[in-house]
Amino acid sequence: MLTVHHLNKSRSKRVLWLLEELGMPYQRIDYQRDAQTNLAPSSLKAVHALSKAPIIVDGDITLCESSTIMEYILDKDIENRFRPEKGSKKYYQYLEWSHFAEGSLALPVMFTLFMGMETRNGDQIMDGYIAKEVALDFGYIESTLAKRDYFSGAEFTAADIMMQTMLEIASKLGLLKEREKTLAYLEKIQQRSAYRKAASFG
Ligand SMILES: N[C@@H](CCC(=O)N[C@@H](CS)C(=O)NCC(=O)O)C(=O)O
């Protein structure tokens, strides 16, 4: 059976959410962040050299990196749910958003989070760069959600799960103020019962 190594308050919620959407059996092993450093415990390093969540183990395969894990799980679903047909326009929209979440959006969102942990005067070179990226990325997200119900089209896919994590953090950081479509979308997908179940694991 597939095992999810789950760190509390982390991107491993994505994997648990997808598995719950699919109703696919799995085993969960929980890890707690260090109260001071917020880092994963050293026991996670025994599972994968990167010691980052999520990690899955399935037979002789051990994988880190959430977007890869999502594709791996979707490949196992014989009903081909939550991912548009390969080669279709929607499929490439799906891929763009799946990769955008970690490839582009994570940088300004996580930088904002980390920069908020120190005193800054707002004029340092990174402040301007991050502000520009935040405006660019969230403008693109808002205009996409003004045209479509979900990131790849009319249907919910795993790209929405990938995007939710960053949007959730962004919302807590106040980056979604006045992004009405994005806020409404976030509220909508967080109503899904599979999301609520995954979120209940901490
Ligand atoms: N790009 C990676 C990021 C993995 C990552 O940074 N995970 C964080 C949790 S959200 C982590 O394990 N942090 C604890 C640590 O670095 O010790 C992914 O999407 O899986």
Image (spheres, rainbow, N blue to C red):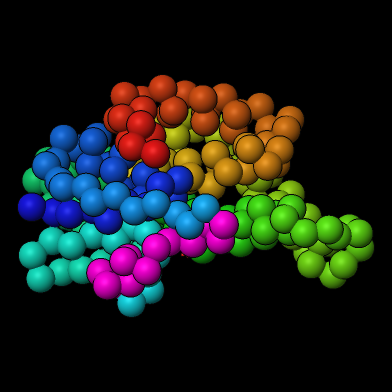
Q: Residue at x 48, y 57 (%)?
A: 34
Residue 11 % position (x, y)? 42, 51
Q: Which quadrant is the C terminus positioned in?
A: top left
**86 sits to left or right of 96:** left
Foreground of the two, 32 or 63: 32
Task: Report the label total.
Answer: 0
Residue 84 % position (x, y)? 28, 45
Foreground of the two, 190 or 38: 38
Residue 48 % position (x, y)? 29, 72
Can residue 127 be seen in this snapshot?
yes
Q: In this picture, is 50 found above or below 153?
A: below
**67 sits to left or right of 132:** left
Can residue 143 be seen in this snapshot?
no
On the image, which quarter does residue 126 sit in? Answer: bottom right
Q: Provide the major secondary structure of the magenta segment.
A: loop
Q: Give the image quadrant in which the ligand numbered 1 is located.
A: bottom left
**120 sits to left or right of 192:** right
Residue 50 % position (x, y)? 38, 73
On the image, which quarter does residue 9 sit in? Answer: top left
On the image, which quarter does residue 127 sit in? Answer: bottom right
Question: Magenta span has 23?
Answer: no
Q: Residue at x 52, y 31 (%)?
A: 186
Which portion, as a residue range, is magenta?
A: 36-48
| Residue farthest bottom in this picture | 49
Q: Residue at x 44, y 34 (%)?
A: 150
Q: Residue at x 37, y 69 (%)?
A: 42
